[in-house]
Amino acid sequence: MAFKKKLEEKILDVDVAMQGNLTFKDPLNMRINGRFEGNLETRGSLTIASTAVVSADITGDNIIIDGRVKGKIIAKESLTLLPAAVVEGDIYPARLNVAEGAILEGRCSMLHDFMSAEELVHYLGVDLNSILEWANSGKIPGLKEGNNWKFERKTIDSWVASGKVGK
């Protein structure tokens, strides 16, 4: 007889005002209903509710916005802007869904399977000199084509998750 261990769903529902830098290494379902200021790095699903006001740079897997967000957003899997969403800032989604009524004031650059060194600067939030130094010394996984480097997004995500950034 085989037993299946049920994976516990991790949920974090934030109804208060918060400020700071939050990083979640394990996937979870997070919903922000109140105010948040700072930087947010999450895995799993992040929902910014219609009552939320967020001023933060956000990096996550699946991000759904129905409230107000001001800051840079990197969505490694998908970004969904619902009808009440108001986003001020540059967005970098792998996939983008925009509902009628949503407002985006900023630039959109889609994440591709491969990124240039300049795109990787935005993706990781690291300066170009560091990226090139890491690439030339073999500290970051990349492919050199002529004088230019290209980086596979999934490989970079695994490299970041392994904690080897800057080492």
Image (cartoon, grey):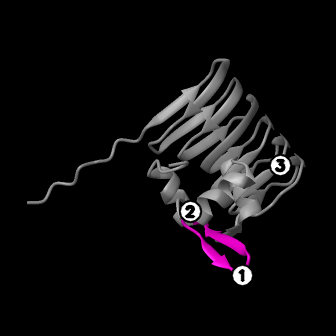
Task: Using residue 67 as the reference point, say whether residue 155 is left or right of it.
Answer: left
Q: Nearer the viewer, residue 19 or 6?
A: 19
Amino acid bearing label 2: Ser
Q: Which residue is mark 1?
A: 146
Secondary structure at badge 3 equals: loop
Q: Residue furthest left?
A: 1
The residues colored magenta run 140-153
For residue 31, above or below residue 122: above
Disc 1 from disc 3: Cα separation: 30 Å
Query: Mark 2: which secondary structure?
Result: helix
Question: Where 126 sits versus 24, above or below?
Answer: below
Q: Which residue is mark 2?
A: 137
Which numbered marker is on residue 90?
A: 3
* C-alpha separation, residue under disc 2 versus residue under disc 1: 16 Å
Q: N-terminal of the two: label 1 or label 3?
A: 3
Residue type, numbered disc 1: Gly
Q: CA distance from mark 2 to mark 3?
A: 31 Å
Q: Secondary structure at mark 1?
A: loop
Residue 40, percent across and down? 63, 35
